[in-house]
Amino acid sequence: MKTVTLTIDGREIVAEKDLTILEVAKRSDITIPTLCHVQGKPSDSPCELCVVEVAGNEELMCSCVTLAREGMEIQTASEAVIAHRQERLAVISETHFGDCKAPCNLTCPGQINVQGYIAHVAKGEYEEALRLVMERNPVPFSVGRVCPRFCETRCRRILVDEPVSINHLKRFVADWCMSHEIDLKIPKDKPTGKRIAVIGGGPAGLTAAWFLTRKGHDVTIFEAASKLGGALRYGFPDYKIPREIVDYEVNTILRMGINIRLSQQWGRDFTLQDLKDMGYDATFIGIGATVDVPFDVPCTDKENVYTATNFLRMVNEGRELDLGRRAAVIGGNNIGMEVARSLIRQGVEQVTVIYPRARLEMPANQRNIREAENEGVQFLLMASPVGLCGTPEASNRLKLDLLRMKLGEPDKRGKRPVIPIPESTNSLGIDTVVSSLGQMAVNGVMKGGELEEQLKLSPAGMFVANPRSSQTSVEGVFAGGDASTGTKSVIQAVVSARRAANNINAYVMGVEKDPADNRFNFHRGRTFDDVSLKNFDGINVNLREKMPERPPEVSTQDFDEVKLGFTEKMARREAERCLSCGCTAFDRCDLKKLDIELGININKTGMGTVPVYPIDHSHRAIIVDRNKCIYCGRCERSCEYDALEVKCESLDEKDRPVGLVIDFKDNCVSCGKCVDNCSTGALNKRNRIVPIQAEEVREIRTTCPYCGTGCQMILKVKGHTLMEVTADPEVAPNYGDLCVKGRFGHNFIQHPDRLTRPLIRRQKGMPLEPVKWDEALDFIAQSFAKILGEKGPDALAGLSSARCTGEENYAFQKFFRSGIGTNNIDHCARY
Amino acid sequence: MTGLVTVLGSGAMTNTINGIVDSDVMLVIGSNTTETHPIIGLRMLKAVNNGSKLIVADPRRIQLCDSSELWLQQRPGTDGALINAMCHVILRDGLEDKEYIAERAENFEAFKASLTDCTPEWAEQISNVPAADIEQAARTFAAAERAGIYYTMGITQHTSGTDNVCALANLAVITGNLGKAGAGLNPLRGQNNVQGASDMGCMPTFFPGYQRCDDEAARKKFAEIWGTPVSDKPGLMATEMPDAITNGKLAGLWIMGENPIISDPNSDHARKAFEQLECLVVQDIFLTETAEIADVVLPAASFAEKDGTFTNTERKVQRVRRAVPPPGEARDDLSIINMVSNRMLGNNRGGYQGSRDPIYHTVPPFAAEIFTESASCWPALTGISYERIDEEGLCWPCPDADHPGTPILHMGGFPRGKAWLSAITWTGPAELPDEEYPLILTTGRVLYQYHTGTMTRRSEVLEESAPSAYVEMHPEDAKSLGLEDKEVVRASSRRGMIQLPVRVTDRTNKGLVFIPFHYREASVNLLTNDALDPQCKIAEAKVCAIKIEKIESESVEITLN
């Protein structure tokens, strides 16, 4: 073999003669980026990403078509090379049009792969949908009921008709898995030997415990109450999150293997120092914000005056309360709405929410306000309480004095303050008053011990924790959830605690924390105004499924759940409304990868803004989106059958295609190799509708189960679901080739027709019925033993299978030969 | 396999898939390779692009014909005559590899004498292939430095299946094409692990590693390994089982991963027999037609849910790895066998019956352990271990841990010493067309479906690509019956009747019709003949006589795509 000696990036390399620089570099593990190269089939008009600098040449050279020669000195990453690559990428990216991530995914504080789980629902894969949600949110049962639904506000379907009911779908998959007794079998890492204490068993504590346990740590939750759940159990009344749902949710999390200590009040029963002494390597504070901001007007020390969290706790604990006929709720936050609705359910005839500003300015979610109003809650706006000192009339227990308010001049930030209207005093005769003026984690100073006293608190009574590291002012003590952020939604507590868990893991293991998702994103328009309506050509109006719920006149009579949940059919229909904005090539897109690597800021250099081509669904296995095509030609050149043609009417001034055509010829065998070679999401496998984002994807090498060629495949698996099949171009016997069955023929694995339980027919003529393994095994053992006893071993036979593994075939014949004593064993394809 | 064992002493593809591109001539006979083995077909097309010559022998104008130098359109069931005639021409003209024959073959003179009358003209009479084409095929094949033969069920699923294979082996031997790259005698296995299932002794007359059950030493060896005596009585072949049931000899049957009710010729006969069993256990991933009549159905794992090995058509032992857990309470087949074995035979593992694995629920002994045991009882596998095949598989024979495997067989000699050139007398198919059943039916696969369709028909891209059975028919035959393309017709044989649409095409010959066997709603194996090859007992699925009738009434209920 003739060789040449050259240097690449200062490394001396001896290479086979007549290879391209690109190939030589690859064999020496030097990566040169390319968007168009197909091994052995270089492009006629290269993408120029693979340029290198060769000493003595003024021009940069494309390494994919330049042969490596004796004595060459090559730079693969010089300034000039990088600059050229950046320039080329900017040009290519400028016309690339699509969304990397869907707006719903981007808007979700939990960064949950929303489009992904909706796609799973559309395919009937509810279990996998829930698993996907739980990769980032371990409390989907609750969040599916109470989430403020940031995602739905950005759903592009709004531009067609109404947003997809995303949260109802999340609730559906959670409930479906609960009613089908699905064990999600979520794995955890090997034990690390590290012990973590989690103070607080609410959404934040449970979340931190869940993620830390998955990382292999030994976690113990310390909870002050007698049951876990925190705000989920004591903050949200039953009609929002029923007790049995909280129980199930908590148990699902505990099944991961988490220690719990109940009725352990921090500061009273144990201190941070105790935890240290017990050997915990780190502590997470997730106690929520459960201390009510005091109702700071005169005479609130009377009976029948409550604060919100105390009141809700008593209601949720089922305490008998004498609340009278009329009640006032002071404050317009979400908790106030739950207080008001709980009062209605307690038989209070008139419930009035009092708030000093306008309705739109109430901090409560407007949906919650509407729901309260539907149930008969009244609102007294632009009014503020001044005291409870007045003597009530005989029919009332309390007299609440109020002042009317008006808006003042805007302050520096443009917000108009409320100012009392002088002498507008008014009063309200009531029997009960509940103040809901906000919550804090600690009122005053955290007591307990020295370490407790060192914990820094914010003026609003929250633990101060570094937003990046989640660290408090005490070494090894972290905080998250409402206890550090103040009262927010459950999903926000989850996000905060998840981040803390990541930080704690990095802290105790001495490793870097998992990187945050990259924010690089092609998009079809950031705001609704930016999105071309042409995107929605051909999409018909199809209104969202209506959530079945009990009417207010019925639902206010008890604390049972108001919203009843989607049926399976409704969920499937709703999921099919999803426009699948995000790119299903998210995990394999080379353009995005290189843009990120080379630091291209597409918001400055530009990206496509309007769709030029409709999406083509005419191929049986492949969906074509020419708007994403960068005209690299890899699909055409990788096709083994010459069955694909990519052409255009003309090129624009920067050599980009105009009037692009991607044509599958009649001899296309749908093998899908072109999709695996596509450098963007222009070509997509039709049955691969779930985008894979930052989630863990396992790649398992195995052998194709169809014909005898024995093609080597890579199964991409997420959770328990096979997402797609590809092949390694370096591995025999198929070297990256697969047929249509190899790439598209494995959906049967997840088919609902799969047998999932043993069946027996107790008597001839009777139907098959499902039984436990034990019974099936006994049935076989007894039947075979009877035949063996009566007719001898040769009255039994086995038919084995060329579909099963060698090991199974060996064991099968061994059973018949050594166990039964017969050679009656065959398989149908032995000829 | 029986045929290959007769001539060479072992039955397996002799060469590799990679080597195809190195061949000078390829004879593809009875294999619609681009549809049944697409990646191997791709390599053949690549070889043609590289200048190798392709000879296709097939009753239908399969896709490969379009790239072939020569297409021999034999009548179904006449392959033996065709091959004998090719051998005749080679010997007549002295084109054989004399040195090779002298060194590596025996029985040459008797063999040569047996071919005296097998002239191309004689074969033309039988096969309808012009004598001149047979002459050309023989000369092209014999002239090549490297000539490979590729065949599948089109050769074997005949009453003369064994003879056909022997005839092909003769052709390979006399042209010196065994034991070198780019050549060989290459049965392309139709299923992922045909080779492995055979290697592992799932055959009524062979223990693992083709060690004969009637061989005293082999019996002793296995009795020792397994710790129990083993029977010397040859077992029943699969195709003999239905009759054994009907005769009351067989009362209990355990079927693992097969669907014989659809895949067996004259399948109605098989169904009726199976229904008489005292106990039928079926283990599968779906409720197949066979499972529907079982007494016990055991939910099994798919390939993606278990560990083990498949041995591909080139004898390469390759890993199968579990990627996802089986659904519900389904279990991998090995664990099921272990559970039944434990339950029935007691404690072969210290009474341990359950599983400690919370996700896969596997029950020991596990695949790796079984593989080691199987490798220890057959020298050809002894050098293979899971560690060695982690990255890439190894082709057996691989006798020791340092052996690189054997991609090409017979480089030095044949297992039986010299190749036995056997005289083959051509015999026709068991059933030929007559007045009542005037058409020849042949069966096969299509690219988008597989076998009885239990898997492919549940994978939407595949099913939507080829959703319906059809009968392929020559335009003249269609015209004489007054049939239009896509018209639903009645196809019947002496054994059964199905209804399905016609596909009029000149890819099939006049007098010949083709029906794929994947479709339960028009299951062609209700029509096919279960007449058996006398030696290996394979049934003649590839040729029988049928008639096609127009359905006159208006009440056709089958909808067409």
Image (cartoon, rainbow, N blue to C red):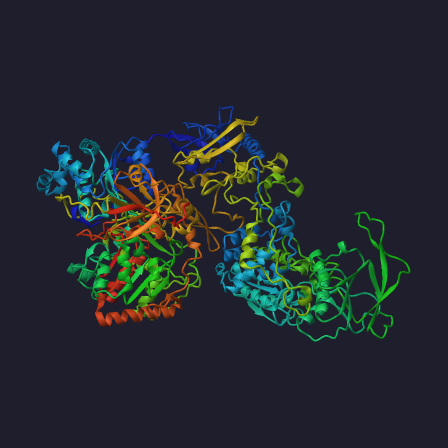
A718 or A169: which is nearer to us? Answer: A169
What is the residue that sits farthest to the right in this orientation?
A423
Q: Quadrant of the N terminus of chain A?
A: top left
In the rendered image, residue A472, in percent from the top left (x then y), is placed at: 66, 58
Judge whether B470 appears above or below A720 on screen: above
Q: In which quarter of the view is residue B57 placed?
A: top left
Asked if residue A225 is positioned above or below residue A663 in the image, the reply reads below
Q: Determine whether B68 is above or below A552 in the image.
A: above
Q: Position of residue A638 (x, y in %)?
A: 42, 36
Q: Is residue A138 left or right of residue B544?
A: right
Q: Position of residue A215 (x, y in %)?
A: 52, 58
Question: Front-most of A642 and B446?
Answer: B446
Q: Nearer the viewer, residue A645 or A246?
A: A645
Decide if residue B96 is in sight here: no
Q: In this orientation, does residue B129 appear?
A: yes
Question: Which residue is drawn at the image coordinates 40% and 56% (left, top)?
Answer: B305
